[in-house]
Image: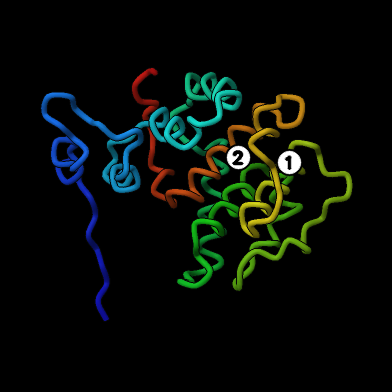
């Protein structure tokens, strides 16, 4: 059995090595085609990855720009969030079949706060996410939004839409931040959790 231990370094993902880079003009791509590799190498800031993923939706970007500006240096809600998620990962052990970006997205959202973890943490099972185990009676609107988003991402069913995210009356600022960060995990994997810099301004 061969285990791939290769990890991209900043030198590997230098933009000057890219096929989209032209010496006279710089990068000619509309969006970076190698952003996942650049995230792994630690050279992408929060601003770049969020703008690349959501740039097509102007209404949503109007809500995301303050989120980018106020980036606290981590994707976690707080340090307890990180500890809860790491604890769940240890408890469940490793499963190649189960441990997909979508599963980690659910884990990220369901460990983001103590109350949602108490209500939905038992949905995180050794075989995957089982949403019927959640206790939703008298759940807060904030946590219910996170639950619906997690279920939608994991099952590819209708959940929280881009239109919902753009509406402050539907998705509050705290839920928006967690859902956007969860969507980054769903797209690029857990490597995004290592992003600590906001990055350049627009």
Do residues under tags 2 and 1 come within 8 Å of each other at their CB atoms?
Answer: yes
Whether 86 is drawn above or below 35: the answer is below
- The residue that appears at 55% across and 24% down in the rendered structure is 58
- Which of these two is toward me, 175 or 88? 175
Q: Could you tell me residue 95's position as x and y percent?
A: 49, 72
Answer with the quarter of the image where residue 112 lies: top right
Q: CA distance from mark 2 to mark 1?
A: 9 Å
- The residue that appears at 59% across and 27% down in the rendered structure is 60
SS at badge 1? helix
Q: Which residue is mark 2?
A: 179
State left or right for residue 124 relative to residue 197.
right
Whether 164 is drawn above or below 7: the answer is above
- The residue that appears at 18% across and 43% down in the rendered structure is 19
Q: Which residue is mark 1?
A: 145
- The residue that appears at 57% across and 49% down in the rendered structure is 108
- What is the number of callouts on the image? 2
């Amino acid at each position: 059995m061969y285990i791939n231990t290769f990890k991209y370094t900043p030198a590997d993902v230098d933009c000057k090595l890219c096929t989209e880079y032209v010496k006279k003009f710089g990068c000619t791509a509309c969006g970076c085609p190698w952003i996942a590799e650049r995230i792994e190498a630690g050279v992408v800031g929060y601003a770049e990855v969020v703008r690349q993923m959501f740039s097509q939706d102007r209404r949503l970007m109007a809500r995301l720009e303050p989120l980018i500006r106020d980036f606290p240096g981590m994707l976690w809600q707080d340090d307890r969030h990180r500890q809860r998620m790491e604890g769940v990962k240890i408890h469940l052990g490793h499963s190649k079949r189960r441990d997909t970006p979508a599963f980690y997205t659910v884990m990220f959202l369901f460990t983001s706060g103590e109350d949602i973890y108490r209500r939905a943490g038992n949905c995180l099972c050794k075989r995957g996410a089982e949403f019927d185990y959640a206790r939703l009676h008298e759940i807060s609107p904030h946590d219910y939004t996170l639950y619906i988003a997690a279920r939608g991402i994991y099952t590819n069913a209708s959940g929280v839409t881009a239109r919902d995210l753009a509406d402050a009356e539907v998705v509050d600022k705290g839920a928006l931040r967690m859902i956007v960060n969860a969507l980054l995990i769903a797209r690029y994997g857990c490597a995004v959790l290592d992003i600590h810099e906001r990055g350049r301004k627009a």
